[in-house]
Image: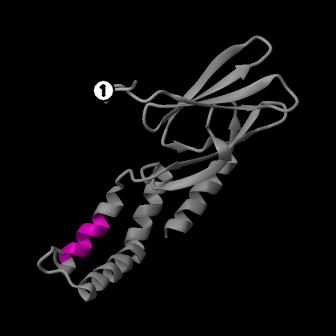
Amino acid sequence: MMTSDNKSPARLHAILAREADKAVVFRRGPSNKTAILEWDLQTDRFKLGQWFYGSLYPYRCDISPDGRHLVYFAAKYGRGSSIDKYIAERAAAEMGEIDSLSFSLDRYRRYLRRRDEIAADSKTSKEIERQVRAGEYYDCSWTAVSRVPYLKAFEAQRRTFYRSAATKIL
């Protein structure tokens, strides 16, 4: 019987290569930490690749037939980007705080419109693009290919990711 002070057990997910005696294992837990391991089925040995902090979706991942490459889908949501805080604070400063006493649907809609205008502002857009390139803006998801058991995407893919992420955000 599990008590409230026990941590939940780690979750395991493995994907086998079709034409090789290799597999990739995802060990999720605690919380949003996932370890990526390479499993050599001939020797029954594991090689720890890296820990990923964020959401990794094993059911949306696959391994190449020879077991050398991994296609993965990952995301980092809700990291509290400074740009999100800036947009919300600027809109609140211009429109005034919305609390339970001053709430009206019309005022809330004006606040949301102003927040969207601030987000579309060229200065804000440039800052978002800078944060995406620097790896400071984490509210995004991506699909990439890497060598098992690491999640470092190939260089060309990273450049494409940053360009497409900045376009989607802007």
Residue at 14% over, 81% down: 102
Q: Who is closer to the viewer here, 60 or 51?
A: 60
Q: Who is closer to the viewer here, 166 or 98?
A: 98
Q: Position of residue 87 (x, y in %)?
A: 31, 68
Q: Position of residue 131 (x, y in %)?
A: 43, 55
Q: Which residue is mark 1?
A: 5
Quarter of the figure with residue 69: top right
Main SS of the magenta part reads helix
The furthest residue to the right: 19
Q: Secondary structure at mark 1?
A: loop
Q: Position of residue 10 (x, y in %)?
A: 50, 28
Residue at 64% over, 19% down: 47
Looking at the rendered structure, the kind of residue marked 1 is Asp
Q: Is residue 140 left or right of residue 24?
A: left
Q: Position of residue 93 (x, y in %)?
A: 18, 74
- State the quadrant of the N terminus: top left
Q: Within the magenta stretch, is there residue 87?
A: yes
What is the crowding at mark 1: few (fewer than 14 residues within 10 Å), some, or many (at least 20)? few
**For the magenta stretch, what is the residue range?**
86-93
Residue at 27% over, 85% down: 105
